[in-house]
Image: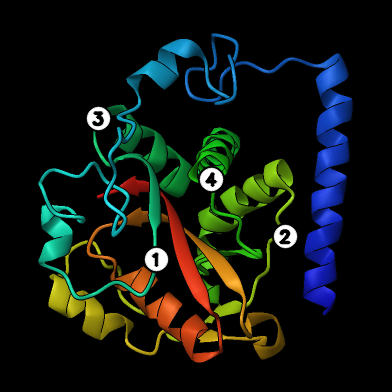
Amino acid sequence: MEILSNDMSYNRCADFAKRIVSEFVSFPCPACVKNMPEGYSGLCGECFGKLPVVMPPACPGCGAENDGIFEVCGKCLKEEKRNWKKAIAIMRMEDYGRELLHRFKYMNDISLARPFGMIAASLLEESGLRPDFIVPVPLHWTRTFTRGYNQSQLVSRIISAETGIPMKRILRRVKRTPKQANLSGTERRKNLKGAFSATDGEICRNSVILLVDDVLTTGSTLSSASSALLECGVREINILIMARG
């Protein structure tokens, strides 16, 4: 309960600080650091125009552009049935989008959390989904310690502040696993089996969850995380990712 109340206090303080600061200070676009942000994205028009954003119709399995006549895309047809009902993706993992996400995830450029979170919040509102809670996919504590932050949690806080939907840290990474990047789909699933556990059965029970992560490639991380939530009694899971790999 202490963790949850801390999250709510953070959101209230962050929202208050945002309103106060916006009255007196203007910050440049966090992507190029030269132009001023425009519109809802938190980026300047030039930077937002370079993002490889997902165009509708989107695949409900992974959030990518649907490339065929079936309900899900060709990549998802080759994967096991997803644990979630709908996926929302901001962009494809390529070109300028890849560059910005790498800066955010690996180069300590946490100022990019705001535009990713603001774009994600707008997409969530447009989707018509109204989850009870936003849940970031956690890192193992050793990775959080070495990196200094969890990128999915930073974005989740922005989404929560923009939409008013509470963020809950009700997942724990209980298994430290090798990095997924160089593993096959089968190896990824084996690597992540039992990697997560839910920490609050009362909150989970019969709730609708939005699970937030940075990248979906095969979906192994999100499948493992969502399995832990379903086992704890969650009724429905939808996912939101920054990029479809």
Instruction: Identify the element where label 3 is drawn.
Output: helix
Mark 4 to mark 2 CA distance (whole Å): 14 Å
The mark nearer the N terminus, 4 or 2, is 4
Tell me the CA gap for discs 1 and 3. Answer: 29 Å
Residue hosting label 3:
95
Dot 2 amino acid type = Pro
Mark 1 / mark 4, whichever is N-terminal:
1
Kindly identify the residue that appears in the image at 37 percent across and 79 percent down. Answer: 224
Crowding near pointer 2: few (<14 within 10 Å), some, many (20+)? some
Look at mark 2 in the image and give the residue it sits on: 166
**SS category of the residue bearing label 1:** loop
Taking the spot 52% from the left edge, 69% from the top edge, the residue there is 138
Whether residue 106 can be seen here: yes
Judge depth for marks 4 and 2 and give the one in front: 4
Q: Nearer the viewer, mark 1 or mark 2?
A: 1
Tell me where residue 226 appears, x and y as whole percent: 44, 76
Q: Earlier in the sequence, mark 4 or mark 3?
A: 3
Residue 197, label in figure: none
Q: Looking at the image, is 64 positioned above or below residue 142?
A: above
Q: Please, what is the three-letter code of the amino acid marked with disc 3?
A: Asp
Amino acid of disc 4 = Leu
The label number, if any, that marks residue 85 in the structure image: 1
117 displayed left or right of 107: right
